[in-house]
Image (tube, rainbow, N blue to C red):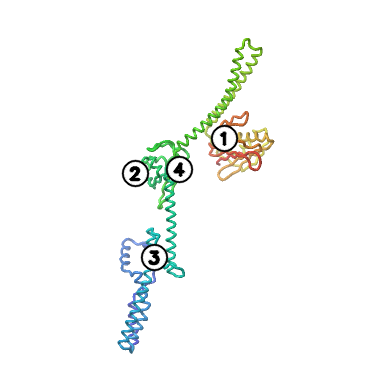
Amino acid sequence: MGSARASRAIRAAAAAIPWSSDRSVDEGVDRDTRGRVCSPEKMMKRTRKDRRRITHENRLTWITIGAVGPAMIVALIIIWFGDYSAKVQWTLTLLMGGFAASFILSSREHIIRPLQTMTNLLAALREGDYSIRARGARENDALGEVLLEINSLGETLRVQRLGAFEATALLRTIMAEIDVAVFTFDPERRLRLVNRAGENLLGQPMDKLLGRRASDLGLAACFDSDEDAPLTLNFPGGSGRWGVRRSSFRERGLPHELLVLTDLSRTLREEERNAWQRLVRVLGHEMNNSLAPIKSIAGSLESLLRREPPPVDWQDDARSGLKSIATRADSLSRFMQAYARLAKLPPPQREQVNLGELIRRVISLETRLSIDVRPGPELSILADGAQIEQLLINILHNAVDASLQTGGRVLIGWREIADCVEVFVQDEGPGIMNPTNLFVPFFTTKPSGSGIGLALSRQIAEAHGGSLALANRRDRSGAEALLRLPK
């Protein structure tokens, strides 16, 4: 009878304990139990259910009660249905209940406080306060290791934020001090950032510029221009020719555009002035070389004609002087024709040209020296055949001139490199003595040279989108010319 009553009491007490479910709930995903996306109405219902759902700390409390509840119930049944006095029954019941409540509350406190501490730490990190540290962080302890990792995370974030602040301060200083205008625009081409040079260029402070469209600021033309060509623009803070550079970056997942404007007027004027100085110096040198003897011979002829009576051979002297004047005038005329040829190079008429056949044709035109050939792959390039042929004739002619001075040989060949073709011409001459003036127009060390061969050759190469370089050879004496052309 007593055991039956005890069993019924145990089953009733066990049924009254709210055991928690093992099923986990992902509260961050708006889906139902089958994984389907919840509608707003279902979400409202779930919110109401969440309010009635037992909290984590209460769940842990009930789990603890469930752990000690059966033993207490059994003990109480034994005490109250056993042969004990009322004093013993009440004493043991109160003692057991007091200890159970104390330990349950203590376990609840030991579980909740660390979680609250970690919550406060993570909230401080989220708010950007990296100076708070948790006490009790130590190794060989599960909770202590968690707090230790959170403290390490805070220190790492503090160091990174300090580095970001320093980098940002350096970037702001550089942006403020550089003399190029920097602008950033959002996807709608509204201004989001401008440096001090940009403010001076547009003639307004930053607070009046931010948020305005590029078209309203007069910068719309910069987005459609060619970056390789200077752009002529007029702004409230300055006008002239500007170099435009554009790039893109992403901020908060959205594409932004970076625009950099560089004032090229001063640089171009300086380069133009230097070019004019070099040109005037070369032209003056060449013209003086021709006019000085003409003036001297003309003066001699004038004094010869003033003599009374004239010398017996005055006709021979006059004929010789006039011939010298005609020769120097012809040289000066050829010099001016060469200058006009350099200044009026026509644009290339591109067509498919077999590079191997072109080089072999150029070699056949040079009869002073046998040319060694190192053939490359058979390929065609899109170029002006006549201009490239003239270029190769010029550099091959110079290589043969250099090799004839020392009795050396000349090697020509070509190879394919990535997306371009490289033609090389190597000689065994004395080498390049003055590489600084190699491509200066009308500068020459040859007695009968015009000084436009290399300048014209480099102009042809650059007109085709390529390059021409000359340098002394490293393996032996001599020079090497490298011509690179796009395929």
194, 20: nearer the viewer: 194
Q: Amino acid at mark 4?
A: Arg
Viewport quadrant of the C terminus: top right
Residue 118 is labelled as: 3
| Callout in the foreground (3, 1) | 3
**Marking on residue 245:** 4
Q: Residues within 10 Å of mark 2 (few under 14, many from 20)?
A: few
Q: Earlier in the sequence, mark 3 or mark 4?
A: 3
Give amino acid for label 3. Met
Whole-angstrom CA distance, mark 1 to mark 2, is: 50 Å
What is the residue that sits farthest to the bottom in this orientation?
83
Q: Amino acid at mark 1?
A: Phe
Mark 1 = which residue? 439
Instruction: Kindly report which numbered mark, 4 or 1, lies closer to the viewer in this rendering.
Output: 1
Which label lies toward us, 2 or 4? 2
Q: Compare marks 1 and 2 and give the one earlier in the sequence.
A: 2
Q: Cα distance, mark 3 to mark 4?
A: 49 Å
Mark 2 or mark 4, earlier in chain: 2
The spot of residue 453 in percent (x, y) is 59, 32
Helix, strand or loop at disc 2? Answer: helix
Mark 3 element type: helix
Residue at x-position 42% and y-position 58%:
158
Q: Tell me the crowding category of disc 1: few under 14, some 14 to 19, or many 20 or more residues within 10 angstroms, Cα based.
A: many
**Is there a contact, CB below 8 Å, between mark 3 and mark 4?**
no
47 relative position to 304: left or right: left
